[in-house]
Image (cartoon, rainbow, N blue to C red):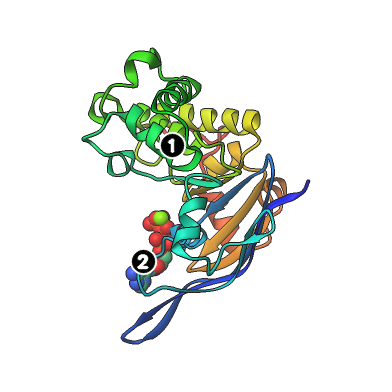
Amino acid sequence: MSDLFIVDDLTVTFPTSRGPVEVVKNLSFTVGRDDTLGIVGESGSGKSMTALAVLGLLPRGAQTSGSVRLDGTELLGKSERDLRAVRGNAISMVFQDPLSSLNPYYTVGLQISEMYQTHQGGSRRAAKQVAIEALERVGIPDPERRVDHYPHQFSGGQRQRVMIAMALCCSPSLLIADEPTTALDVTVQAQILELLAELQSTTGTGMIFITHDLAVISSIAQRVLVMREGDPVEYGTAEQVFSDPQHEYTRMLLDAVPRIDDEVPA
Ligand SMILES: Nc1ncnc2c1ncn2[C@@H]1O[C@H](COP(=O)(O)OP(=O)(O)OP(=O)(O)O)[C@@H](O)[C@H]1O
Ligand SMILES: [Mg+2]
């Protein structure tokens, strides 16, 4: 399996009044084509900072060192202009809260087609057709009509599907999903996970799936990276990490995952 995406010794530092604070420390991982990497860790462990660093979207003041390469091209230190050509195109991202990422004043069709036209050009009409197809691909019924609807006319799960449609409209090589199902109820969560896994296997997009929930990872990832307070604690194939965790912290996370054979409390 050739590696599509290589992160090597990534460190993210914030200057504070008490000196620099490292929120991501010497992180290394790879994502292959057709591969899903799960990044797990509790709140504040640096998962989102890792994703934002990759996309050049860190808050002002943050400093990075190390290397982030997509298909051999170094992304760290690229100009904002160059990164803008990458974001939404070669690498795209799905965030936790689709409402805050969608513009309430524009139809979902317009938002998807604008994303497409920005990167791929073409006519408005062609872009709208792309939006309809994208909505269809993520399982929105009646996409020809729904393309002209506004975000508030969709349910929470459907809005997340719209975000995924937008993220995939330019056929990215890498999709980063940061807690994409956290805001959804359990049934819808399972549907979105299934959709992501299915799209990933049909499009061959590499995926980084970020979550605090190890149970979610087990159903979707081939490789797992466990983070704690910015440190990479454990990294390996899902099989290794689940069957033979090397670190006490991973064992603790695994113990917290409810299992099917657990006794149901009376
Ligand atoms: N602007 C900032 N300045 C200094 N520290 C920051 C800043 N933004 C975030 N941090 C710190 O960076 C650390 C990592 O945050 P991050 O958002 O990556 O966590 P996370 O693993 O995504 O957590 P969650 O599961 O809650 O989303 C946190 O300790 C946070 O306090
Ligand atoms: Mg986060």
Examine the image and state in which quarter residue 165 appears.
top left
Q: Nearer the viewer, residue 237 or 195?
A: 195
Kind of residue at badge 2: Pro
Residue at label 1? 117
Give the vertical position of 33 relative to 5 (above or below): above
Examine the image and state in which quarter residue 113 appears.
top left
What percent of the width, then of the height, locates residue 72?
Answer: 69, 58
Helix, strand or loop at label 2? It is loop
Q: Nearer the viewer, residue 174 or 253?
A: 174
Residue most toward the left?
105
| Image depth: mark 1 or mark 2 in front | 1
Residue most toward the right?
1
Ligand 1 quarter of the rendering: bottom left
Residue at label 2? 59
What percent of the width, then of the height, locates residue 206?
Answer: 62, 43
Give the vertical position of 73 relative to 26 (above or below): above
Would residue 232 be found to the left or right of residue 111 on screen? right
The residue drawn where x is 57% and y is 30% is: 199
Q: Is mark 2 within 8 Å of ligand 1?
A: yes
The residue drawn where x is 34% and y is 87% is: 18
- Residue 42 visible somewhere in the drawing: no
Give the vertical position of 86 relative to 154 (above or below): below
